[in-house]
Image (cartoon, rainbow, N blue to C red):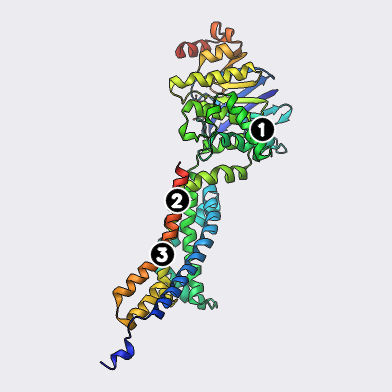
Amino acid sequence: MESTSIFFTSFKTTDLWFLAEAAYRTLLISGISISLGTVLGLIFGWLLHEGRLISTFILSPFLDIFRSVPLIIQLVLAYNFAPIIGLNIDPFGSGAIVLTIYTTALVANVVRGGIDSVGIPMRRAARSLGMTYWQDMIYVVSPIGIRAVFPAWVGVALGVMKDSALVSVLGYVELLRASQILITRTQEPFLILALAGAFYFALSFPIARFSERLEKRWSQ
Amino acid sequence: MIEIRGLHKYFGEVHVLQGIDLDVNKGEVLSIIGASGSGKSTLLYCINALEGIDEGRITVDGVEVHAKSTDINKLRQKLGMVFQQWNSFPHLTALENVALSPRIVRKMSRSDAKKLAARRLEHIGLGDKLNSYPNALSGGQQQRLAIARALAMEPSYMLFDETTSALDPELVGEVLDAMRLLAEEGMTMICVTHEMGFARDVSDRVAYIHDGAIEEIGTPEQIFSNPKSERTSRFLANVR
Ligand SMILES: Nc1ncnc2c1ncn2[C@@H]1O[C@H](COP(=O)(O)OP(=O)(O)OP(=O)(O)O)[C@@H](O)[C@H]1O
Ligand SMILES: [Mg+2]
């Protein structure tokens, strides 16, 4: 009994801090990826909508690859590939890059759908009033398109936050990795997984709530 | 004045407009009638360059619509257009729908644009709907909203593309009345329409389009009572 206590020690309040810090890292890596991915997704989604040759033949298949290859494979590949081409990126860096590209691919599709949802007649009506292409985009297409696909975007954002757990395979100590470490030490999987779950919930709840409010306001 | 000379338009292989020559004078109301697919909408879209053209020339008050040097967004302010589908901006109230382009295109202040919009909406009988969203308005109300929205740009010409075709029969009257009122106020109007009664009562001239060409054009009396062309009389016999 004596020897086991060296390895297994029970859950302490400092462990809660350890989890909180890990939750912060989850928030950090997913926040960065979602923000950057959304900005890039807007640009690529617009390119997809415009449907010029480049986007049809290069961009579209390229984004499809990132949407369809399992994230964990992308992460491991990127992490191991980077040193080969002489890049020295830490787990956080490679995780953030892969998650950002992944988010970009998902958001681009959502954005394309949003722009497409505004029909040509509506856009002609806007242009017939003397609006320029960009005025139409900003004052007519964006508000209508955003309302149409906002729930889908929220789905992507929440999904990416949960999927950021996969970055743990690279050794980045976010929520999931931190829980595993604590479970190994305390042998209290239920308590710790419940706590980790609570943290994930606490991270996503505000987003879900906020989007619910927005949608309610729009629907009136 | 709108002048159209030798206008040809293709959609791929399809020769949709086959040499249109047409003048529309200031203050005139011209109705365009013709079978489905004869190119009526396309003709209107060419006039405000929502469609490009392949041959010929269109000028509005001396400005060539399809010239590269033309500021088309500026020119379109002169050419109000109302479509078959009313295309209300669903995220904006009636007032905001009308005030949007005066504010962003004509660069009016927010409050001036709103005042103008309110006046326009009251004039067309929507004074009690200023703060309603389009989904709370009937089709007829939304179509009148579309008219008010176009008029808020203070255009010199109005193009109407079958503005009543998508409406329930009982709502057609209010939209036609609004168009009639506009004609009485002296607006220059080109109306693509299937409403023969409207074409007969309100227009100064009526043009019958067949297969992308003007088959016959003249006063309503001439077209409806005494058409010269066999095709015109056959078309009219079918719609009546
Ligand atoms: N964007 C387009 N691409 C290809 N063909 C088109 C396009 N728009 C119209 N056409 C074709 O051009 C022809 C003329 O169309 P247009 O809409 O001008 O007819 P219309 O006289 O307005 O008919 P309707 O009374 O049904 O509105 C039709 O054969 C139509 O199928
Ligand atoms: Mg038509």
**3D distance between C-alphas at marks 2 and 1:** 38 Å
Task: Report whether B144 appears left or right of A197.
Answer: right
Instruction: Tell me, yes or no, if residue B219 can be seen here.
Output: yes
Q: Residue furthest top?
A: B226
Query: Residue A62, how many percent across, how many down?
Result: 48, 59
- Looking at the rendered structure, whether the residues under marks 2 and 3 are on a common chain is answered as yes
Q: How many marks?
A: 3
Callout 2: residue from which chain?
A
Q: Is residue A21 above or below residue B85?
A: below
Location of the N terminus of chain B by quadrant is top right
**Of residues A31 and B71, the one drawn nearer to the viewer in this rendering:** A31
Residue that appears at 68% across and 26% down: B156
Residue that appears at 56% across and 11% down: B201
In the rendered structure, which amino acid carries the disc numbered 1? Gln
- Looking at the rendered structure, whether the residues under marks 3 and 1 are on a common chain is answered as no
Q: Is residue B129 above or below residue A173?
A: above
**3D distance between C-alphas at marks 3 and 1:** 51 Å
Q: Give the residue at mark 1.
A: B77
Query: Residue A87, how many percent across, how many down?
Result: 54, 77
Callout 1: residue from which chain?
B
Residue that appears at 57% across and 34% down: B95
- Looking at the rendered structure, whether the residues under marks 2 and 1 are on a common chain is answered as no
**Of residues B142 and B192, the one drawn nearer to the viewer in this rendering:** B142
Q: Give the residue at mark 2.
A: A213
Q: Is residue A3 above or below residue A162?
A: below
Q: Give the residue at mark 3.
A: A202
Q: Crowdedness of circle 1 by 10 Å Cα count: few (<14), some, many (20+)?
A: many
Q: Residue furthest right?
A: B62
Q: Crowdedness of circle 2 by 10 Å Cα count: few (<14), some, many (20+)?
A: few
Residue that appears at 60% across and 30% down: B118
Query: Residue B160, how many percent across, how many down?
Result: 57, 25
